[in-house]
Amino acid sequence: MNVYISPCPIETTLNLIGNKWKIIIVRDLLNGTKRFGELKKSVSVTKNQNISQKVLTQNLRELEEAKIIKRKIYAEVPPRVEYSLTTLGKSLDVVLHSLETWGEHYKKKY
């Protein structure tokens, strides 16, 4: 995922988290560490659609490459993998809160 850093900070942000699933993944990880299956379930319920394993994996890899999430692999059989937000990822809480506030305002008006 070569991240395009735009001269416009809004465009840079959207390049990093602005697709159909990433913002929901980040939102779910703001509540704490999750395993792959937990994320797949929580993301699918929110969007009322099922995210495929391939698409979730791709989005998680891109968020990891962008240093927004981190992946921890445990040396167990079967292997256990957990995902959590980095400090940078946690800083998106303010962005998500602003989106939530705006969305609530919009829902009340329309």
Image (cartoon, grey):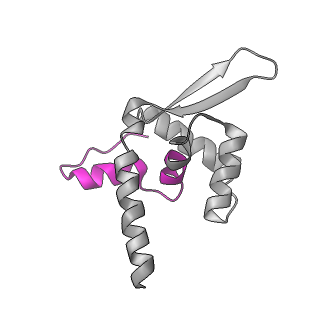
Residue 92 at x, y percent in the picture:
38, 44
Q: Residue furthest left?
A: 7
Region rendered in magenta: 1-26
Question: Is 50 above or below relative to 68?
Answer: below
Q: Residue furthest bottom?
A: 110
Total numbered labels: 0
Q: Nearer the viewer, residue 8 or 46?
A: 46
Question: Is 63 above or below relative to 98?
Answer: above
- Taking 61 as reference, is 89 left or right? left
Residue 106 at x, y percent in the picture:
39, 76
Q: Nearer the viewer, residue 12 or 88?
A: 88
- Taking 47 as reference, is 92 left or right? left
What residue appears at the point 45 percent right and 33 percent down from the top-left corner? Answer: 65
Residue 58 at x, y percent in the picture:
57, 43
The quarter of the picture where the N terminus appears is top left
Residue 87 at x, y percent in the picture:
39, 30
What residue appears at the point 62 percent right and 46 percent down from the top-left corner? Answer: 56
- Taking 36 as reference, is 26 left or right? left
What residue appears at the point 37 percent right and 34 percent down from the top-left corner? Answer: 88
The quarter of the picture where the C terminus appears is bottom left
Q: Nearer the viewer, residue 53 or 88?
A: 88
Question: Is 100 above or below relative to 80?
Answer: below
What residue appears at the point 67 percent right and 64 percent down from the top-left corner? Answer: 49
Magenta-drawn stretch contains 8 = yes
Q: Residue furthest right?
A: 77
Magenta-drawn stretch contains 108 = no
Question: Is 41 above or below relative to 110?
Answer: above
